[in-house]
Image (spheres, helix red, strand yellow):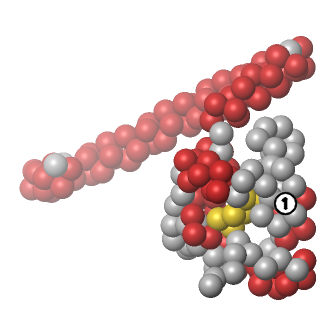
Amino acid sequence: MADFAMLIAVMTGLEDKVLKDKALNIKLQKSILYQKNKLNKEFLDAQRIRAARYYIKNREKVLERQRIYDKINGDKKVIRNHVRRAKQKGSFGNYTSIDIKVMIEAQGYQCLYCKIELEMHGDNKYHIDHRMPLTLGGANDISNIQILCPKCNMRKGRTCPDVYEKRIGYVGVVAC
Ligand SMILES: [Zn+2]
């Protein structure tokens, strides 16, 4: 449409005016966007300050609500984080919170490595571990997922699983 308007303008000798109008229009749009962003930023800053004040006053209430939210939403936050990291590393695969529940059940509610009982909530809640780390080219697929206690997951870090399992003497499932 704009090109058509320009064609007409060139034909009728109004080219300069159209160009000027265009430039003015862009300037105007930019200024509107700037104002909008500025207002948005001011709004967000105010909102952040309000949230921080509320948190200081109602810390326990906020934390309790967060705990309830985490209980209801289970592993969604971790799964989202894994999907994002997998994308960055170009890994394939996906898994769901149901997959995790099934896996925990299959592991008998125990850490795969040290056999300690897995905690379902709180600070020591089980960790969803990529057996072959995403950083080493592991998939974000359920076949590459195992459930560990936080301690074992932290110790394993980004070590190659074969090396780590040999070090701790973990044999795993022996095929017959
Ligand atoms: Zn463990």
Dividing the picture into quadrants, the one containing residue 128 is bottom right
For image coordinates 26% across by 46% down, the residue present is: 17
Name the residue that disc number 1 marks.
115
Q: Is residue 27 left or right of residue 134?
A: left
Q: Is residue 72 left or right of residue 154?
A: left
For image coordinates 63% across by 82% down, the residue present is: 175
Please tell me which residue lies in front, 123 or 32. Answer: 123
Please tell me which residue lies in front, 46 or 58. Answer: 58
Q: Residue 58 at x, y = what percent? A: 86, 15
- Residue 160 higher or lower than 71, as above or below: below
Q: Residue 100 at x, y = what percent? A: 62, 52
The answer as to whether callout 1 falls within 8 Å of ligand 1 is yes
Please tell me which residue lies in front, 96 or 45. Answer: 96
Q: Residue furthest top?
A: 57
Dividing the picture into quadrants, the one containing residue 138 is bottom right
Give, as a three-letter code, the residue at label 1. Answer: Lys
